[in-house]
Image (tube, rainbow, N blue to C red):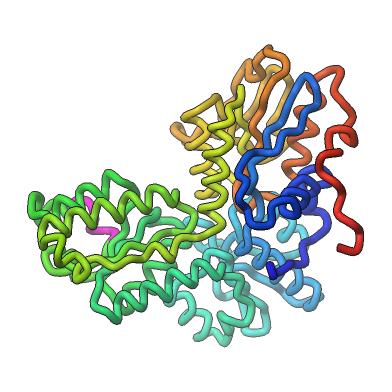
Amino acid sequence: MTRKFDMPIFYRGPIISRVKKARQIMDPRKRDLAPAVLDFGPVRFLLARHFGFCYGVENAVEIAFRTLKEHPGTRIFFLSEMIHNPDVNRDLQERGVRFIFTTTGEQIVPWSEVSSEDIVVVPAFGTTLEMHEELGNRGIDPYAYNTTCPFVEKVWKRSAQLGDENYTVVVHGKATHEETRATFSHSVKGAPTVVVRNLDEAQILAEIIRGNLDKVAFEEHFREKCSNDFDPERHLARIGVVNQTTMLATETHEIAQLLREALSDRFGEERISEHFADTSDTLCYATNENQNATYALIKKGADIGLVVGGYNSSNTSHIVELCEKAMPTYFIHGATEILSGQSIRHYDLEAREIVTSQPWLPRRRPLDIVLTCGASCPDSILDDVLLQVLGLFDGTRPIDDVLKPYPQEPADA
C-alpha cells in the first residue's frame, strides 16, 4: 500500500488535488499517461498524469512541519532550502526557520550562532559527509532531523556498492547542485568519481575511454569535477553510472549507453560485463514518471505551456526544456507572474533571467494550455495559476461542472 503523508492543508488545491486523486483511483496501476482535460469552454487546461509533490518531497514536508509542531520555542535551522520551491521555503521562514547556507553553498548564518541546543534539519537533497562531521563536532546529530530523499540515499548506497566492486562512479548531474555535491561526497569515500553534466561531456569521456583523447583533455574538462588523483587511463576502465535524481532519465540512459559503447570498443563486447555495471535500478521512479507524463502531454499537443515551480528547481527546468521543444512555454513560480492577458513575467532558461513577454495568450478559441509543474510545487499553487488564467476569459463554464468527471474523494477516505 502506498504510504500516505500528512501534508499541510494549505498545500492542497480544491481543483488540482481533486483531479490528481481521481486519476489515482481510476488508474491505480498508472498505466494511462493521457493528460486530464479541464474544458472551461473558451480555454481548456491539459494536466499531466503525474506532476507535483513526489514521495521524497512529501516525506521532507511532513518531517519539517512535524518538527516545527513538536518543538515550539526551539530554534530550528535548515542547512539550506528544504526543497527548491520559494513558497514552501517562505512558509518555513515565516514560521521561524532559518537557512544556514544558500543553495550554492555560501554560508549566511555563521556557526557561532548555532548551538547544540538548536535543531538542524538536513534538506531533501541530503548533505555531504564533511557537513555531517561539522555538525557532529558541534554536538548536533545530523541524522536526528533528516529529510534526505530515500531515492537519493539509494544512489549513495549503489555508489558504495560500486566502489566495493572496484568500479569508478560516473555521476550524471550538475556539479554545483546540492544533491550532486552530496552524492559526490559519499561516492569518493569508496570509489574514484567523476561528474558529467550532459551528453556533450559524456562524449568527451567516451573518447578518452577509446584513447582518442588524452589525460590533458580530461584535465581540461573534468579537473574540478573528479576525485583526487583520478587517473582516466586506469579509472575509466571499469565504471557504473548513477545520477542526480532530478536529471532527465532519458539523458542518463543515453549517457550510460554512450559510455558502454566506448568500453565495448576498447575491451570488446564479450568482456563488457567486466567493465560496465548495470545501474538502471537507481533511476528515481517519480522523476521518470513525471517526465514520461510530460512526453504524453507534448504528444497530445497544445497552444502554449505553463510550467510552475522554483526557478532553481532542476527537475522543473527539465520539464520546461521538454515542453519548449513542442510549444511556446512559460516557466513561472506562481500566479503573480501572470500580469494580464497581454503580459506574463517568466524565467528564461537560456538567458537565465526573468523576462516579461507581450503578448503571450494566443487569440485562438478554444485555447489549449498545458499546465504542469515540478516535483516540489504544491497543488495549491497550480490552483492559483489556473484560476488566474481562467479570470482572463469570458463565458467560462462553472468549475463544479468541469470537475464532474473527477468525483470528489469521500471525506473519510
The percent position of residue 84, horizontal first and vertical second, equals 59, 53
Residue drawn 23% across and 57% down?
260
Nearer to the camera, 118 or 376: 376
Q: Is residue 339 above or below residue 100?
A: above
Q: Residue 281: percent from the left, percent from the top?
A: 43, 65
Tell me if 252 is positioned left or right of 375 in this view: left
Quadrant location of residue 111? Answer: bottom right
- The relative height of residue 7 versus residue 131 in the rendered view (above or below) is above
For the question of whether residue 309 can be seen, the reply is no
The mark total stands at 0
Residue 27 percent location from the top left of the image:
69, 52
Stretch in magenta: 219-225
Magenta region, main secondary structure: helix
Task: In this rendered view, identify the residue nearer to me: 291 or 156.
Answer: 291
Q: Quadrant of the C terminus?
A: bottom right
Is any part of residue 285 visible from this angle?
yes
Q: Nearer the viewer, residue 259 or 114?
A: 259
Q: Is residue 48 left or right of residue 154?
A: right
- In the image, residue 382 above or below residue 68: above
Q: Position of residue 47 (x, y in %)?
A: 68, 38
**Residue appearing at x 16%, y 58% in the figure:** 264
Q: Quadrant of the N terminus?
A: bottom right
Residue farthest along the top direction in this orientation: 363
Q: Is residue 402 magenta?
A: no
